[in-house]
Every structure is written in structure tokens, then in C-alpha cells.
């Protein structure tokens, strides 16, 4: 008996099964393609992030460390400023270089500096040729910058004692107020040492060497202790600056990490130097700018909370998570830092410049 020939219904069922298989395969292929596209996009993003990190590391190690104009642009700005400050009548000598020719203005010495006039008369008051009398016809002027060397001196304060011939009462002038009780440094000497340390970054051991070269024998530890006394003297000024700063409606803060030497261990741990700035002159404010600093042994947000206790207003800072607790109370509002945002844009632009990043 022969097999029954497939009917139309069999063919339609077969076609339906094949169409279902093809549809299932298409779905599988589409899902796989989508997965591949997703993995490719993630890989491209990861490559881009790694490339940005490499570019940032290379720029820190071998290139510019900040967003600066090219050196030629900076030199051009300096030149334009100097020419404008010199005035239209200033002499502008041309200095030749192997690579370029620059016009340098003649810089005039500060007219507010102390001046010593030295007149150099001819050796003879008569003409060396014929012996005739001389008459004045003008004079030439030339200025040189000289240095009057600093000198340490000892101030000996003498307070004579007197007694009353009638009642024998002893009379004597009061002792002068000293910068450091039982110390040997005057206010001027203490200010000089502190300015050299924090204004010109001269360590105490180097200052001690410089003072020894001028005949002053002083220990480095003495200079270090003097710094503590100077800080105590400046405390009222510091506290007043901080008090005024807290009364403002907007404060900007940021921190810099630096190593701190741990006492008696010889090791270091990471500390932080915080700056707090209140300056709204760019917004039309007439209030003077105020800035104060605070060094901490770590970078915890509690230090900022204690420093800004009583402040109510806007705090402009970066995205450090330690600030989150400060914003919870509602008295202090968060304002993001555009400089940090621009830094990220600069990193992207430096690696993969686009029209949008160039405009930003």
C-alpha cells in the first residue's frame, strides 16, 4: 500500500514550522547582535577611559600640568602689557635671537624705592686741555639697582632706677612688651623669620645657616618654637577673619593633600590644607575678599563642618563625599565647582578634541 501524498494542510503546517524556526533564529541572531553591539560599545568606552587616563598621566609626567596658553601666547601678552605700561615715548630696543626677534621694553625702576644721589664731578675743576674755567651745560643720569644688606642688631634696653629723696619710692620705666616672653626675638625679627618660612619657603635649618653667616648663632628648634608663638599672636586676627567670612552668604572651599611628619615616629601620614574664600567681586559685590586656611591631620568632612559652624548660605566645592553631611541640614546649599567640570572637559578635549569641547 503506497504512502498517502502530503496534503495542502501538511505543506502549510510544514511551512509554519519552518517560519517559526526562522523567526526564532532571527530573534537569537538579533539578541546576539545586540549583545555584541553592547559589548563593543562598553569596550570602546573602556578604551576611551583608559586612553584619557594615559593621556592625563603623560601630561602630568611629561607635559603641562594645567590648562595654560602656549608659551608664545604668554610672551605676546607680557610684551603687549610691557609696551602699554612703558608709554608711547619709551625706547623699545630690538634683541636678536636665533629663533625669533622680540621687542623688549626698557623697564624703569620703581620710583617709590629709596634713592641715593651720587654726583661724580670731574677730577679737575678746570679744563685739562687749556686750563680754562668750566661752566655747567647739563648732566647725564643713569640708574642702577643696589642692595642694602640686611643686618641683625642687638637692642639693649636700659631702664634706670630712681628713688624718691622724700619717700624712697622706686621709680622705673615699664619694661617693653616682648613678642615672646623671655625670648630674644623682636617683633620685626619674628616677622622676618615667619615671612621667610611661609612667604619664601625657606626652611628653618636654612635660615639658621644664613643667620650664622651673619654672626647670629641660633638653633633650628628655637626658630620652630618661635613659629608656634607667632601663630598664637596671630590667633585674634585669624579668628576675626574667619568670623567675618562665616557671615558672608557664599564661601568657596578646596583642599590640598600633603604629607605630615608624625611626631617621634619618623613616618608621615596624609594631611590636608583647606582654604576658605569669600570673594564675590566678580558678581558686583563691594565687600573685600577674605580667605583663611586650616590644616587638618586627615581629609574628613567633620573638619569642614566644624570650620563652617554657624555659616548659612552657599558653599561652592568639588564633589568630595565628605561635604554630603553638610548639605543635609538645609542651611548650607551646594554649588558645584565649574573649574573641576572644565578640567574634565579639558582632559577629553586634549585626548579627543571635538567642536563641542573646543567651544566649551
Image (cartoon, rainbow, N blue to C red):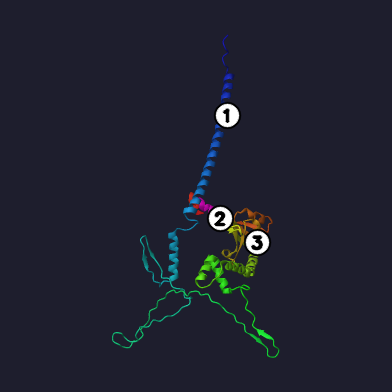
Compared to 117, does 319 lie above or below?
Answer: above
Which residue was labeled with disc 3? Answer: 307
Compared to 325, does 208 lie above or below?
Answer: below
Q: Distance between the residues labelled 2 and 1?
A: 50 Å
Which residue was labeled with disc 2? Answer: 340
The mark that comes first in sequence, 3 or 1, is: 1
Q: Which of marks 2 and 1 is in front?
A: 2
Which residue was labeled with disc 1? Answer: 24
**Residues under numbered marks 3 and 1 in contact, where contact means CB atoms less than 8 Å apart:** no
Q: Position of residue 95 (x, y in %)?
A: 37, 66
Q: Can residue 312 be seen in this view?
A: no
Q: Quadrant of the N terminus?
A: top right
Asked which secondary structure carries label 2, the reply is helix
As for residue 344 lying within the magenta part, the answer is yes
How many neighbours does mark 2 have within 10 angstroms: few (below 14), some (14-19), or many (20 or more)? few
Compared to 42, does 177 lie above or below?
Answer: below
Q: Which residue is drawn at 52% across and 46% down?
A: 50
* 209 and 287: which is toward the camera: 209
Q: Position of residue 66 (x, y in %)?
A: 50, 57
Q: Distance between the residues labelled 2 and 3?
A: 23 Å
Question: In which image quadrant can residue 176 be found?
Answer: bottom right
Q: Residue at x 52, y 66 (%)?
A: 206
Magenta stretch, residue numbers:
337-348
As for residue 136 lying within the magenta part, the answer is no
* 84 and 190: which is toward the camera: 190
Q: Can residue 302 be seen in this view?
A: yes
Asked which secondary structure carries label 3, the reply is helix
The mark that comes first in sequence, 2 or 3, is: 3
User: In this image, 186 relative to 132: left or right?
Assistant: right
Q: Mainly helix, strand or loop, the magenta region?
A: helix
The mark that comes first in sequence, 2 or 1, is: 1
Q: Residue at x 55, y 54 (%)?
A: 341
Amino acid at each position: 500500500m503506497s504512502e498517502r501524498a502530503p496534503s495542502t494542510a501538511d505543506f502549510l503546517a510544514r511551512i509554519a514550522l519552518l517560519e517559526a524556526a526562522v523567526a526564532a533564529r532571527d530573534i537569537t541572531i538579533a539578541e546576539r547582535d545586540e549583545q555584541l553591539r553592547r559589548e563593543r560599545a562598553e569596550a570602546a568606552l573602556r578604551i576611551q577611559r583608559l586612553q584619557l587616563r594615559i593621556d592625563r598621566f603623560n601630561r602630568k609626567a611629561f607635559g603641562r600640568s594645567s590648562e595654560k596658553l602656549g608659551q608664545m601666547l604668554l610672551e605676546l601678552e607680557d610684551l603687549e602689557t610691557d609696551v602699554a605700561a612703558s608709554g608711547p615715548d619709551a625706547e623699545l630696543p630690538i634683541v636678536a635671537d636665533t629663533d625669533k626677534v622680540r621687542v623688549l621694553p626698557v623697564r624703569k625702576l620703581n620710583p617709590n624705592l629709596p634713592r641715593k644721589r651720587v654726583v661724580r664731578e670731574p677730577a679737575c675743576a678746570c679744563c685739562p686741555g687749556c686750563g680754562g674755567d668750566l661752566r655747567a651745560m647739563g648732566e647725564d643720569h643713569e640708574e642702577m639697582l643696589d642692595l642694602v644688606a640686611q643686618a641683625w642688631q642687638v637692642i639693649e634696653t636700659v631702664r634706670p632706677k630712681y628713688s624718691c629723696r622724700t619717700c624712697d619710692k622706686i621709680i622705673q620705666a615699664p619694661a617693653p612688651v616682648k613678642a615672646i616672653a623671655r625670648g630674644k626675638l623682636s617683633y620685626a625679627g619674628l616677622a622676618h623669620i615667619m615671612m621667610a618660612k611661609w612667604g619664601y619657603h625657606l626652611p628653618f635649618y636654612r635660615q639658621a645657616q644664613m643667620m650664622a653667616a651673619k654672626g647670629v648663632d641660633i638653633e633650628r628648634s628655637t626658630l620652630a618654637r618661635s613659629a608656634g608663638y607667632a601663630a598664637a599672636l596671630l590667633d585674634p586676627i585669624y579668628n576675626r577673619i574667619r568670623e567675618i567670612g562665616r557671615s558672608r552668604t557664599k564661601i568657596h572651599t578646596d583642599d590640598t593633600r600633603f604629607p605630615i611628619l608624625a611626631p617621634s615616629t619618623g613616618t608621615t601620614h596624609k594631611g590636608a590644607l583647606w582654604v576658605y574664600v569669600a570673594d564675590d567681586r566678580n558678581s558686583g559685590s563691594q565687600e573685600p575678599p577674605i580667605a583663611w586656611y586650616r590644616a587638618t591631620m586627615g581629609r574628613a568632612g567633620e573638619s569642614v563642618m566644624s570650620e563652617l559652624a554657624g555659616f548659612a548660605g552657599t558653599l561652592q566645592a568639588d564633589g568630595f563625599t565628605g561635604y554630603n553631611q553638610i548639605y543635609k541640614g538645609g542651611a548650607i546649599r551646594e554649588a558645584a565647582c565649574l573649574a573641576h567640570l572644565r578640567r574634565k572637559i579639558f582632559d577629553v578635549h586634549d585626548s579627543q578634541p571635538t567642536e563641542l569641547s573646543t567651544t566649551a
